[in-house]
Amino acid sequence: MLTNNCTTGRNDRLYKRGDGVCTYIRNDLKPKVLLKSQGDAAHPEYIFIEIQASLQKCLVAIVYKPPKAGHLSDLEIPLTNLLPQYEHVLVFGDFNTNLLALKSNGTKQLCNMLEAFNLKILPLNPTHHTATTETLIDLIITNNPDRIVTSGQLPVPGISAHDLIFAEYSLQCPKAAAKFITYRDLEHVDDDQLISDAMELPWHTIFNLVTVDEKLTAAFNNMVIQLFDKHAPLRKRNATHRPAPWMTDSIRNLMASRDAAYRKYRHDKSEENFYIYKKIRNRTTQNIRNAKRRHALCLVDPSITPRYLYHGIFDSSIYVTCRE
């Protein structure tokens, strides 16, 4: 599936809603899916993807091992077959194996397997936080730790109890192509001058035309566009952020309160602080979900049936209205 300038690679869990692994990679890196797991909840889930930057190829793997799943050896076969073909290897994932518990059998098995493939685990602090525990289960693994420019983790209280892990790998990559959008600035239109100019246009000429198409395209549209070009000319700018029309100041304030409560809880892990953070987090999540739902309803005319939406049969002749 293509989304803007990126490609989404998915390997969903079979016979169950949720779970699975996913990648989101720029198209100019030429992502190519090499191997996927079978989506069985009793086994680790993974997706191996090749990316190419200039003449260099890199193997990227996303792994998720469910908490009660065994069969870590399932990863040995794809690693054995793929690693010799790539100079650069990066593995990210939730292994549900606490590396802080050095004496556990799961930790020993994972470390021994990675050592056999000459793969190194980058140092991180605990990445999963609950009211009572902190564990290091989300890992960044590579065969070239010297190529890592930066790596670390960021709290994402609005999304998960897991920290967001990241790594910057030194690999000559093509520069992402700039994306430009064209728009009209309608907020700063002088309404009085617009009405004055509109009154001077020869609207009566529309009635002298024969067909409806001529009246619309040859006359009416041209005069309306003429007004737009004068009072709100087309502008072009570089789109650096995806629009979020559903975002409001109240939601931004809630998100700031949520993050502040999370930082306070991380500093002082009392039950009271955790309860306050969880309450604000749930409220923020619900408000965001409701705002997105309201915005989606505004974009769709209630007269359009689900069948038309699914098959994309309707065209521009169907009007889109906003419901209050």
Image (spheres, rainbow, N blue to C red):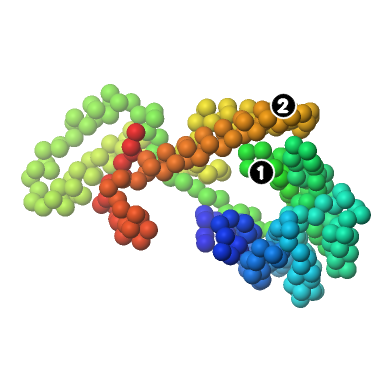
What amino acid type is highlighted by mark number 1? Ser
Disc ID at residue 160:
1
Q: Secondary structure at mark 2?
A: helix
Q: Badge 2 is on which residue?
A: 272
Instruction: Identify which residue is drawn at 72% across, 44% down.
Output: 163
Q: Is residue 146 above or below residue 50?
A: above
Per the model, the C-alpha gap separating discs 2 and 1 is 20 Å
Instruction: Identify which residue is drawn at 85% across, 52% down.
Output: 99
279 vs 235, left or right, is: right
Instruction: Single out the residue that lies furthest toward the top.
Output: 192
Residue 9 lies, in percent from the top left, at 59, 62
Residue density around tag 2, few if under 14, some if 14–19, many if 20 or more, within 10 Å: few
Residue 4 lies, in percent from the top left, at 52, 54
Q: Nearer the viewer, mark 2 or mark 1?
A: 2
Disc ID at residue 257:
none
Instruction: Single out the residue that lies furthest toward the right.
Output: 103
